[in-house]
Image (spheres, coloured by chain):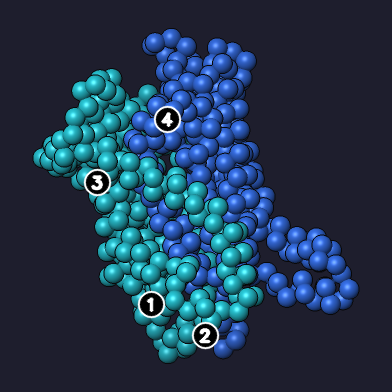
Amino acid sequence: MTAVESNQSKKNMTWLAIVSIPIMAYTLIPILWIMSLSVKSSATLADGKFIPAEVSWDNYKLILTGDAHSLFIPALVNSLVVCLVATLISVVLAMFAAYAIARLEFPGKKLILTTALAVSIFPVISLVTPLYNLWRAVGLFDTQIGLIIPYLSLTLPLSIWIMSAFFKQIPWEMEQAAQVDGATSWQAFRKVIVPLASPGVFTTAIITFFTAWNDFVFAISLTSERARTVPAALAFFTGASQFEQPTGAIAAAAVIVTVPVVILVLVFQRRIVSGLTSGAVKG
Amino acid sequence: MSTLVEGDVRETGPGGPGKAQLSDRAKAERTLGWKLAGPAFIIMLAVTAYPILNAVWLSLFSYRLTDPTARKFIFLNNYAVILTDGLWWMAVLNTVVITVITVAVELVIGMALAMIMNKIIIPRRTLRTIVLIPYAIITVVSAFAWRFAFAVDTGFLNHTLHALSFGAFSDTYDWFGGRWSAIFAICISEIWKTTPFMSLLLLAGLAQIDGSLEEAAKVDGATFWQRLFKVILPNMKAAIMVALLFRTLDAFRIFDAVFVMTAGSQDTSSVSLVAYNQTISRVEIGMGSAVSVLLFLCVLGISAVFVRSFKVDLSRVRGE
């Protein structure tokens, strides 16, 4: 019986391993495809081959130092500034809120979490019209601040959620235990609480940053030129001439903004998964 | 959703009954709680509640940004115009079709992926890592990758299909030339991008099922499908509902992929794209606001249906 069973589970394992190959191909094909496009020269761009016949760096030169760099580099800087500032503000505010939710007893806890949920399912485009009107009136249209403020509606609720789920798992009693053992409050906080809480804070920051980095709706609606971020700039890339498709340049720019993020995700895979799913199944 | 929030205020709002009996310590904890969580709470409201209320107000005007002096109060006229316009209903149909197809396909693929990831041993880490890649890619980039893949000139999909079907499939088929073929391409891009998120939520639910239940069913001779429908799925209903709710609402506000892949040509607009075109392209602030309010109401409606009929307790979804 046991021999049959282990034999069968071995067979299952092999079968699962084989199935995982097409799954991996499915997830990798579009990213490999955009990489392949980015290294095709304009002559071979339309050859329809998945694997480029030869590798050319022309598209990267075009967007990093060539004609398109005045479009791409400022957009990259805008994206980084806007997303980092929005993430920083959200994570700091959410840290206080999540601490209160995880550790303190006060009325309205449920209200805060429900509001965070309601805000996060909000249709982003619904905020665009009034903000467009308002930002034009007060001079925030096409500025970095004019993007950072609406980005908080994406990043803040997410940070509050993820971080409160993380903070609830922290064994807070250890702080008191350390104090009983003679540590000062500051020592207890620095030596016990900070190491326990920082993975959660860090993971929240990564997920929050992605959400802001991914935004397209606010970026194309509330900017026209100066504050345009990468996703918006990609959509408005034009070819070197009117008759030339900017496919190669878009592909190269896409690879530049995608690869670092993919590496980040792969490195912190475990934490990101736990952050994304934390508490989601307790309902 | 809004009634949920209001009910909460009445029940547990600060300064409610019972305050007098509280000890000083509990009082101090209350104050500290709101001092810490208050700023985040106020900012969340300020960046969403204020604009949406503003949109409701603006939607009652005939107001074009290029001609501010002609701004006129017209009450619900904008809504009447939109709801009798074929363009709006076309966008609603597109959005509903995209939502239903993508969410249904994602649920099936996501569930299959979750079950494989749950059982697999050999490339366990690698598989779980690689599956996350679509999540890490900007939606706009994913839409471009698929647009270029489907395109007649630069694409490889037509050539592949042509070869696989031994020439039956024309390799000059224009996917973006027709309404439903373009929507198909949009769906593929969306499904690819968001299935990992779905499968991770489902995997988390799957991991919580007591393994002995399935084992017992297996011993009793239940087939794979019996185990799936009688044991596994009922035991992870909550996780499925949460995943469905999130993805449905997310799919319903689809914008990025439609904008990049078709920009609404061939009657492929989504509701969000209609709102964008009214506001940004035509600077019809009044009309754009009305579309925004209608979209917001749709999202509220969908959430209400989920909460009511599936009894998803939203406050317990995360954190609590």
Q: Residues within 10 Å of mark 3 (few under 14, many from 20)?
A: some
In the picture of the structure, the residue carrying the numbered disc 4 is A135
Residue A35 visible in the snapshot: no
Q: Callout 2: 10 Å neighbours few (<14), some, many (20+)?
A: few
* Distance of label 4 from label 3 (alpha carbons): 22 Å
Chain with blue colouring: A
Q: Nearer the viewer, mark 1 or mark 3?
A: 3
Chain identity of mark 2 = B
Please state the horizontal and vertical placement of residue A177, each as a whole percent of the image.
Answer: 80, 76
Question: What subunit carries mark 1?
Answer: B
For the point 35% across and 64% down, the residue is B6
Amino acid type, callout 3: Leu
Check disc 1 and give the amino acid type: Pro
Pointers 1 and 4 within a single chain = no
Mark seen at residue B294:
3
**Closer to the N terminus: mark 1 or mark 3?**
1
Chain identifier for the cyan-coloured part of the image: B
